[in-house]
Image (spheres, rainbow, N blue to C red):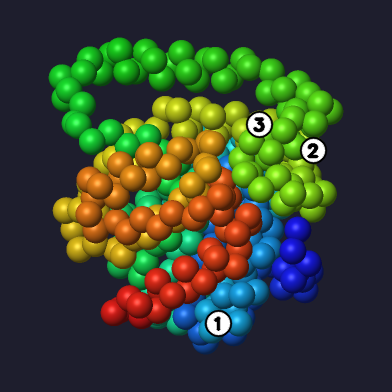
Amino acid sequence: MNSNYKSEDKDDSNYWNWKGFKIFWSLKGKENKHPMILLHGFGASSKHWRKNSNYFAQRGYCVYSLDLIGFGNSAQPGIREIGKLDNGVWCNQVNDFIQQLIRPKTSKKIILIGNSLGSLVALTCAVYFKKEILSVIASPLPDQVVLKKKNSNLNSNLESFKKKIIYIFFKISPLEIILFLINKLGIIKLGLNSAYFKRDNVDKELIDIVRKPVLRKTAARSLRAMCIGMTTRGEKLKASYLLEQLSNSKKVPFLLLWGEKDNFIPLFVGKKIANFYRWVELKIIPNSGHCVHDEDPSLFNKISDEWIRDLKTF
């Protein structure tokens, strides 16, 4: 790992009470500067932006990073406490964060930068709370994009039955044992090696960022709420619908940053999105994988900053 990139300082860490749940967040930069929120991917946390937040703060942004509920150091509620966890819930969390913590300090619109799941959450916010959002940088966008509309006569009873089966499956799945084995068998490192093209970047610090939340007693119950939530969510929370909604409204500037060697979400998905939605700008990062911001932070930071500054609205 490049030693020029330092981890987050402990003294900038905070906790916020959101609907009775403890949410971890941190701040870099001066609060009177333009607000930016960094949204992490699945299994990660705000600390995954350790190579980016200081850079953006030094470039004049007020940089907020928060652990989405269920991840990192934030609360890990289960189905009984919160119901399903999906990008709709995380989107509402981000919006409430904006209203309660950022709006008292500034009325400036928010720049959202997301990695993977964080990108989907950012897209969701751009649709449902577009008046709050200046622009979105998604790196990459993980959801399946269907360009042809589904048959509207699809049997709703069949859909309901499928959701019940999914609910039962994850309800009885031994996720506690699965998470235990993932930790003991070193599967986290294997997964990161698959996600990263530059495997030298998979160091102890990165492994700990992903591993520590898994070790918490509440991890399995929260994972169950996520699995059920994300697999049974409605069409209005899926990327195809969300992108279509942005197409039909005043568009939020949208940049896709995609690793050329992304094994999790192949580059052709990004090209498909950019070809169909011409208002989406795609930039390809050569020899990089699923986590461009952490594999090639210098290039990611530079491209993101230049793109934001080129916006007429900035």
Look at the numbered discs 3 and 2 and tell me whether their residues touch, using CB distance below 8 Å.
Answer: no
Q: Residue at x 70, y 45 (%)?
A: 199
Q: CA distance from mark 1 to mark 2?
A: 36 Å
Judging depth in this view, the residue of 24 and 121 nearest the camera is 121
Q: In this view of the protein, can residue 89 be seen by the observer?
A: no
In percent of width and height, residue 259 lies at 50, 49
In percent of width and height, residue 234 lies at 34, 33
Q: Residue at x 68, y 40 (%)?
A: 192
Q: CA distance from mark 1 to mark 3?
A: 40 Å
Type of the residue with mark 1 = Arg
Vertical arrangement, residue 66 with respect to residue 83, above or below: below
Q: Nearer the viewer, mark 1 or mark 3?
A: 1
Q: CA distance from mark 3 to mark 2?
A: 12 Å
Judging depth in this view, the residue of 103 and 68 nearest the camera is 68
- The mark that comes first in sequence, 1 or 2, is 1
Type of the residue with mark 3 = Arg
Which secondary structure lies at badge 2? loop
Question: Relative to residue 224, is residue 159 drawn left or right?
Answer: left
Which secondary structure lies at badge 3? helix
Type of the residue with mark 2 = Leu
Where is mark 1, residue-wise?
Answer: 59
Vertical arrangement, residue 180 with respect to residue 202, above or below: above
Q: Residue at x 45, y 38 (%)?
A: 266
- The mark that comes first in sequence, 3 or 2, is 2
Quadrant (top left/top right/bottom left/bottom right) for the N terminus: bottom right
Residue 221: give its label: 3
Where is mark 2, residue-wise?
Answer: 215
Quadrant (top left/top right/bottom left/bottom right) for the C terminus: bottom left
Q: Residues within 10 Å of mark 3 (few under 14, many from 20)?
A: some
Judging depth in this view, the residue of 248 and 147 nearest the camera is 147
